[in-house]
Amino acid sequence: MNLIIGSHVSYKNSTQLLGSVEQAISYNSNAFMFYTGAPQNTNRSSIDDNLTSEAYKLMRENNINLENVIVHAPYIVNLANTSNFDFSVSFLIEEVKRCHKLGVKYLVLHPGSAVNSPKKEAINLIAKGLNLILNNNYDVTILLETMAGKGREVGSSFEELRDIISLVKNKDKIGVCLDTCHLNDAGYSIEKIDDILNEFDEMIGIDKIKCVHVNDSKNDLGSHKDRHENIGFGTIGFSNLLRVIYHQKLEKVPKILETPYVTKDDNSKERLYPPYKHEIEMIRNKEFNEKLISNIRESN
C-alpha cells in the first residue's frame, strides 16, 4: 500500500508554499495541510508566484503530489451564522481563488455552528453559502469536515452532512474530510471503522471522502468535546488509528495529522515541539512507541 501521510504545517508570508513544503519534507511526509494565513483571523497576504514555482520544483524532487496538498479554512468562518453570513461567503470565495492560484484542489471547511436558529435552518444556510461560493470555474473542491458536536456545531452526524450535500448544486465540487477525533467525540467508535465507512457509503458515498484528519482523542466516545491527543496516547488507541490509516477503502486519500505539539514537561501547558516526524515514523513502522513524548523532549 502506498501510504499518503503528512501533517499540518505552517505557512509564513516570507516563504509561503515553499516554506510549507520544506517543513513537510522535514517530517518525511508526502502530503501536508496548511492555512493560507492565521487560523484565528481572515487576514491574508498576496501570493508570490515565484515562491509557488520553487515549491512545485521541490515537491517534484521529493515525490509530493499536489493532489495530496490540502488548505484548511480559518475557524472564524461560519456559514451557519446569519449575522456574518455575507462576510463568510465573501471570504471563502476569495479563499477558493487563493487555492486555485496555489494549485491546491481541496479546501477543508468546518460546516458551521448554528447561532440562534434550529439545525435545519442552519443546514439550509450552509448549503446556500456553498452554492454561492462554488459558483465558479475553479478546480477547487470544498471538503466539509466531520465535527465533534460541540455546542451548536453542524456536521457531527453523517445525516447532517448528507442533508447539506443534497442541497449543493455543483456536487462535483463538494466532498468530506473525516476527522478521527471528531468522529470519536461525536459517538462513532473508530474501533468499528468498517461499519462507519459502510454507513458513510450508503448515506453519502465513499468517493466523497477526499481527506482524513488522523488524531487521537483525549475524550470518551460521544463526549462532544473535541480535544486532540497524540497518536496512541488517547482513548482511540494506536491499533484503531492504524486500521483507519491503512484501510483499503481509504488508500488513495491523504492522511493528515493534527496532533498536539509536545510540551517541555508534564506540568507545562506551553506546546513547543512538533511530534509529526516521530508519529509518522511510528505509523510507517506500524509499531507504537510508548516513549514517544519523552523521546521528543530529549531530542530537543
Image (spheres, helix red, strand yellow):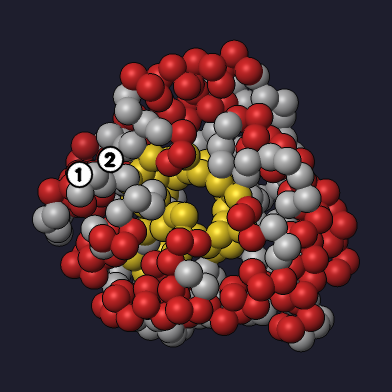
Residue at image position (33%, 59%) is 250
Q: CA distance from mark 1 to mark 2?
A: 6 Å
Residue 245 visible in the picture: yes
Nearer the observer, 32 or 263? 32
Residue at image position (63%, 53%) is 173
Q: Give the numbered dot on residue 277.
A: 2
Q: Give the numbered dot on residue 192.
A: none
Side of 113 where 257 appears, left or right: left
**Is 133 drawn above or below residue 30 in the view shown?**
below
**Amino acid type indicated by mark 2:** Lys
- How packed mark 2 is, by other alpha carbons closer than 10 Å (few <14, some 14-19, many 20 or more), is some
Residue at image position (45%, 54%) is 211
Q: Kindly identify which residue carries mark 1.
A: 281
Nearer the observer, 218 or 190? 190
Pinpoint residue 18: horizontal percent, then vertical percent.
49, 23
Indicate the secondary structure of the residue bearing disc 2: helix
Determine contact: label 1, label 2, CB under 8 Å: yes
Instruction: Give the position of the C terminus as an image quadrant.
Output: top left
Name which quarter of the figure residue 89 lies in: bottom right
Indicate the secondary structure of the residue bearing disc 1: helix
**Is 249 drawn above or below residue 274 in the view shown?**
below
Side of 161 where 287 appears, left or right: left
Pinpoint residue 115: horizontal percent, then vertical percent.
78, 76
**Amino acid type indicated by mark 1:** Glu
Side of 135 where 292 appears, left or right: left
